Image (cartoon, helix red, strand yellow):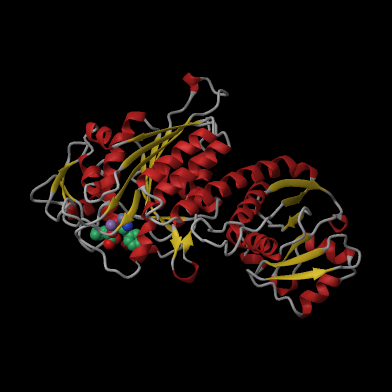
């Protein structure tokens, strides 16, 4: 897909297959729609009065408008003008991209988005357009024998801008494309079945990325090396399955623009990589257990984010760390009551083998300290309790650091990939008390997402740290089951703000 900008004052004279213009409810035309309306002698206003109500996520195709060169003008419903914001704008961009992807427009012709969004900067608008185009063209085909729904070819998206906006718009398109490519990698890894997307597969994906991008270096530690690091907690989860574990380190090094001595400390991303979570001996019920193939979406978002970062040649060191294994019941598996020793030296009483995410993450958090990071952010499909608390709208954000938390919340708002901050008071730590070990791996039913975060905090004392619980946001269930690519937009947006 190609993204470009076009500076023109005369929207009605652009030669294109599809020109999108935004319309608000109550008949209010956006600036672009207004230009087209004048050029076509009021054709738009007439349609808006009669048949187009401009509700969000709706569109109407107009062909051969008099006085307009574009083959089609697509009216995009923007909803009410006073409630229009970045989220509504992202929806409008997606409606247009979905139309273009689905309409099978003649190949080789450009499509042109001119959805104006008052109050939004051109760079963010451009970014949203490119992300929407990437979203609209993702199709899962990897394990379908007959390509059921081939990925649509969206040849070209051109943004209509003023001369003064052109540079910013190009930056936005480049960022959006990188985010979309990262999200689509994250989605594919999530959607792949657990007998394909194994720990080794995640490791090979990291190695392949390192071959493709100069700035990336991958290292995949095997069982023996993980043992040498004394990751007793991570290894205890991996013990129950035939598939061997992998501990993946993927490093992005900032370009030579900044001298090594002036480089800021790296930002470390830690992703939960449980490629299938059956619960272990504390076995999960059968219904919907297939969805536990998505229990590696934290890992997938780390790989997707590093892909974006590498494509953007981001001027900041970023390190991805992924503890990857399965969580299955077997004669060698963890049992309730087992006590394991983590890499940090803290002993852990495993009261429920299904609370395995924290058991693999704690050792990765200990390992992360060796990079003297400026910040560590872990991403995990950690608790069903987080889905109860926040549903499928907001990612759960936990951090003792107000500064890091605010930075991530703002990035989520800017990227239309929002998070909601949850409490982490010390008082919750008491629920993790064990009579037989330093800490228990569960804290009882109340505040399950919070006590999971509190467990992790005990292993993240040496650096500013935040935890993103994506159990509700990483994938959709039901008829449209599929990975979402979240929170790649939030993470890339945050990292873009942290360059040297
Ligand atoms: N991977 C699950 C969390 C999960 C459940 C994510 C449902 C998305 C949907 C995690 O490993 C888990 O099983 N957590 C337990 C923790 C409990 C035993 C304290 C849970 O949430 O039930
Ligand atoms: Mn589990
Ligand atoms: Zn899990």
> Could you tell me how many numbered marks the image carries?
0
Q: Position of residue 78 (x, y in %)?
A: 67, 66
Q: Quadrant of residue 42?
A: bottom right
The answer to whether residue 297 is left or right of residue 316 is left
Residue at horizontal 84 percent and vertical 49 percent from the top = 8
Foreground: 276 or 158?
A: 276
Residue 408 can be seen, yes or no = yes
Residue at the farthest left position: 435
Residue 462 can be seen, yes or no = no
Residue at horizontal 55 percent and vertical 23 percent from the top = 256
Residue at the farthest front position: 145
Residue at horizontal 58 percent and vertical 44 percent from the top = 178
Q: Position of residue 396 (x, y in %)?
A: 39, 55
The answer to whether residue 67 is left or right of residue 55 is right
Instruction: State whether residue 277 is above or below residue 401.
Output: below
Q: Position of residue 425 (x, y in %)?
A: 27, 51
Q: Position of residue 342 (x, y in %)?
A: 20, 40
Q: Quadrant of residue 362?
A: top left
The answer to whether residue 209 is left or right of residue 323 is right
On the rendering, which quadrant does ligand 3 occupy? bottom left
Residue at horizontal 45 percent and vertical 70 percent from the top = 478
Foreground: 401 or 47?
A: 47
Instruction: State whether residue 17 is above or below residue 198.
Output: below
């Amino acid at each position: 897909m190609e993204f470009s900008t076009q500076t023109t004052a005369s929207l009605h004279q652009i030669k294109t297959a599809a020109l999108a213009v935004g319309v608000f409810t109550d008949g209010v035309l956006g600036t672009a729609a207004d230009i087209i309306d004048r050029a076509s002698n009021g054709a738009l206003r007439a349609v808006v009065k009669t048949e187009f109500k401009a509700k969000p996520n709706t569109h109407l195709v107009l062909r051969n408008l008099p006085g307009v060169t574009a083959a089609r003008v697509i009216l995009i419903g923007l909803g009410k003008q006073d409630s229009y914001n970045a989220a509504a704008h992202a929806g409008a961009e997606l409606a247009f991209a979905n139309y273009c992807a689905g309409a099978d427009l003649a190949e080789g012709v450009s499509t042109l988005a001119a959805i104006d969004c008052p109050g939004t900067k051109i760079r963010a608008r451009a970014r949203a357009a490119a992300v929407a185009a990437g979203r609209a063209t993702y199709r899962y085909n990897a394990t379908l024998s007959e390509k059921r729904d081939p990925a649509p070819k969206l040849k070209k998206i051109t943004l209509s801008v003023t001369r003064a906006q052109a540079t910013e718009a190009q930056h936005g398109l480049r960022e959006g494309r990188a985010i979309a490519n990262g999200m689509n990698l994250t989605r594919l890894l999530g959607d792949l079945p657990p007998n394909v997307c194994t720990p080794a597969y995640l490791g090979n994906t990291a190695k392949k990325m390192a071959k493709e991008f100069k700035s990336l270096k991958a290292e995949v530690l095997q069982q023996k090396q993980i043992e040498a690091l004394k990751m007793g907690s991570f290894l205890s989860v991996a013990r129950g399955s035939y598939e061997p574990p992998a501990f993946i380190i993927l490093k992005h090094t900032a370009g030579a623009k900044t001298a090594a001595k002036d480089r800021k400390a790296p930002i470390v991303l830690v992703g939960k990589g449980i490629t299938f979570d059956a619960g272990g001996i504390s076995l999960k019920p059968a219904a919907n257990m297939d969805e536990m193939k998505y229990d590696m979406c934290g890992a997938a978002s780390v790989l997707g984010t590093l892909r974006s970062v590498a494509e953007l040649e981001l001027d900041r060191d970023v390190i991805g760390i992924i503890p990857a294994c399965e969580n299955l019941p077997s004669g060698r598996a963890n049992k309730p009551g087992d006590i394991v020793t983590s890499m940090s030296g803290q002993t852990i009483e495993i009261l429920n083998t299904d609370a395995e995410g924290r058991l693999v993450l704690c050792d990765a958090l200990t390992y992360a300290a060796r990079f003297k990071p400026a910040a560590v952010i872990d991403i995990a499909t950690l608790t069903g309790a987080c889905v109860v608390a926040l549903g499928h709208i907001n990612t759960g954000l936990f951090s003792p650091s107000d500064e890091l938390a605010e930075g991530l919340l703002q990035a989520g708002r800017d990227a239309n990939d929002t998070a909601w901050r949850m409490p982490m008071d010390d008082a919750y730590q008491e629920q993790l008390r064990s009579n037989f070990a330093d800490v228990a791996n569960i804290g009882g039913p109340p505040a399950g997402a919070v006590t999971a975060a509190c467990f992790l905090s005990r292993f993240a004392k040496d650096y500013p740290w935040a935890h993103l619980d994506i159990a509700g946001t990483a994938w959709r269930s039901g008829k449209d089951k599929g990975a979402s690519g979240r929170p790649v937009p939030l993470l890339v947006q945050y990292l873009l703000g942290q360059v040297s």
